[in-house]
Amino acid sequence: MTAPFDFAPLLAPNTPPPAVKWSGFPKYNFIGGHNDAKHLPVDALVEAATTVLRREGHTLATYGLNSGPLGYRPLREFLAAKLKRHAAIDCSPDEILITSGSMQGLELVNSLLLAKGDTVLVEQETYGGALTKLTRLGVNTIGIPLDNEGLRLDALKAKLAELKQKSIKPKYIYTIPTVQNPTGAIMGEARRAELLKIAAEHGIMIFEDECYSDLIWSGQRPRSLYAMAGGEGVIHIGSFSKSIAPALRVGYIVAKWDVLSRILALKQDAGSGALEQMVLAEFCRQHFAEHVPKLASALAGKLQTLREALAEQFGTSAEFGDPPGGIYLWIKLPDNVDTTKLAQAALAAGVSLNPGPEWSTNKDYARCRLRLCFANPEPETIKQGVAVLAEVCRREFGVPLRSANVEPT
């Protein structure tokens, strides 16, 4: 019998641990960016796929679909109009690059701007995937505390002054100003204007992530930072993952051509998935405007189901807000709860959750916090999952003292 080949000595430095084999979703799945399956517009997507393939399927014989390396032009044309209407962004289709999800957008911007040892500023609580990528790049990532309107500018100014004294100039400020991940905060326009002013004074680029901005219950939002800056000194990324379907893996970057041309030169993948772009363009042209409000309404209902279940099962042991949009709820449990340990015990009971330290630069602050995604489970599943989570939390950490739906003896 041949001995297994030992490839461990060949691994590159800082290779992450091996992935765990997937064995299916847990019964109560509150992690990731999964969306509402019942509101996935399957029939309309099937119709769009059939229509666009019959009309333009022959273009699949060439890289770029006769649209060039920026991506399928009808999709970029839809985005230019949608961004103008939704976020006040005035850009041409040739200032939009289609990417394989917003994650590729993050990687491309990082590849353009960052080297090992560079410094970036991020929101203290932020997208865990962004933090992971910055760590692997060997970048000094500094978190700026948040309040109920997002990035705290007093803390930002203090940190910039401190760094200036050390002759350190951050490469960019990464922010999720419209439905922040994980807190759900929306930065007001006055604060956005001040943030732009601060960044300009220090000569720092702003990296604006708007992956959740379509999912606002009211449908109303401030102008994007990119729009307010006229595109100067700002790179903007977005995605169809939350508004249509995460598995399609279609995102985009918006930037002035002098910046976008540099990013395009780094995108050496022969183009993002062509069929997905074609189908999305055909679907969105006819259905996007009516689809998104229906999805947002369903998600708003699920959020309230989750909030009510947490109040019933945890009482005052769980603290949380009422986000104006998105798919996540950020929750604080009592200080003695370690949510990393809780996540392991909960998973054994069929409940998956995101422990707070994975979404924060301040691990101690986030130790007792967690993020729950409410978009995918049905309302009754949300209720059952929260009840199981409360029982695990009670068993492992003694809180809540008892479930609110159990009469005292």
Image (spheres, rainbow, N blue to C red):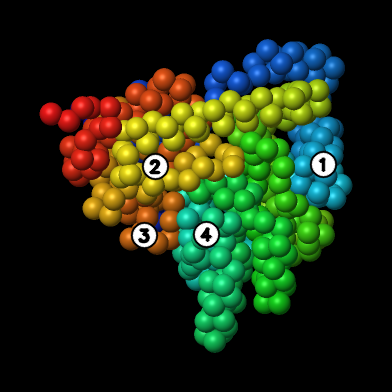
| Image vertical order of residue 80 relative to residue 189, above or below | above
Instruction: Count numbered badges in the picture.
Output: 4
Q: Residues within 10 Å of mark 3 (few under 14, many from 20)?
A: some
Q: Residue 141: horizontal and vertical position, in percent?
A: 49, 65
Q: Quadrant of residue 396?
A: top left
Mark sitting on residue 147: 4
In this view, the mark in front (1 or 4): 4
- Give the answer, above or below, for where 364 lies relative to 10: below
Q: Marks 1 and 4, Cα distance to the nearest angstrom? A: 28 Å
Mark 2 burial class by Cα count in 10 Å: few <14, some 14-19, many 20+:
many
- N-terminal label among 2 and 3: 2
Q: Where is the C terminus found, in terms of image quarters?
A: top left
**Cα distance between the residues tagged 2 and 1:** 34 Å
Quarter assignment of residue 163? bottom right
Identify residue for label 2: 354
Q: Amino acid at mark 2?
A: Asn
